[in-house]
Amino acid sequence: MSYCVNCGVELEPSLRTCPLCNTPVMNPNEKEKEISPSPYPVNKGQVETVKRKDLGILLSVVLTATSLTCLLLNLLVFNASLWSLLVIGICICLFVFTFPAVFYSKTPFYLSLLADGVAVAIYLFLISRLTSSDIWFWQLGLPIVILLTGMIELYALLTKILPFTMLSGALYLFIEIPAFCVSLELLICHLLDHPYAITWSAVVLTVCVIIDIAFITILTKKRLRNEVRRRLHF
């Protein structure tokens, strides 16, 4: 038997409201959970995935528009110097650097790296157009770009055709570092018309040779190699 929570009158089991005060009859044992409406739409929407082609179009339009607008500003308004060459060079580099990721992901690494080197060389050449002399470009800038590109290409080739580990990769790196430093110092000597000699690069060469000898010893001794891998967790 149940009673009205408002007036206390006895209620029949079949009643839904009190006959005296019309208070709704609430049975705790039969109370249904009230479901509040969701504030979100019932139909789930899905944003369309951006295609690589669309990103490529956007990037091309932005870089082209930037280059052309800066060129027009340079020719028509701020024409004291060809500063727009710097902006155009940066746009070329950005386009080349992002080409494999945006336009064609299957571009061979060696070809992509070569294109990056060419783009940097073009940018340095454009910078040389703004200087009083371009000797630094032909005798220092361009040779450095060629040297770095060739060394990175060589490093990638070694890691591909030879067994690669963290130790062997470090060995290749410490072989190329002194080679680059010595070449750089000789190029500077040539640019400044000084006698060919190595000074600061000799220090780098000495340190790297010692490190290379240590790496070679570790790589040739299995117990040392395993101990280093165990301690360094690789």
Image: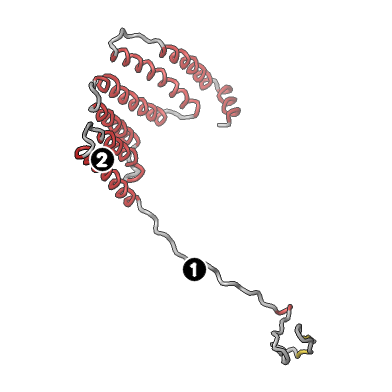
> Furthest-left residue in view?
76
Residue 200 location in percent, x, y? Answer: 42, 12
Which mark identifies residue 41? 1
Describe the element under mark 2 as helix, strand or loop: helix
Given residues 186 and 75, the one toward you in this image is: 75
Quickly name the residue at label 2: 70
Based on the displayed image, in which of its 4 quarters is residue 48 positioned? bottom left
Q: Position of residue 78 (x, y in %)?
A: 23, 36
Give the residue at x 31% y 7%: 195
- In space, the residues marked 1 and 2 are separated at their CA atoms by 46 Å
Question: x and y percent of residue 197 in the render?
Answer: 35, 8
The image quadrant where one finds the N terminus is bottom right
Counting every numbered tag in the picture gives: 2
From the viewer's perspective, is the residue at label 1 or at label 2 nearer? 2
Residue at the spot x=73%, y=78% of the render? Answer: 28
Residue 17 lies, with reference to residue 119, above or below; the image says below
Residue 17, placed above or below residue 193: below
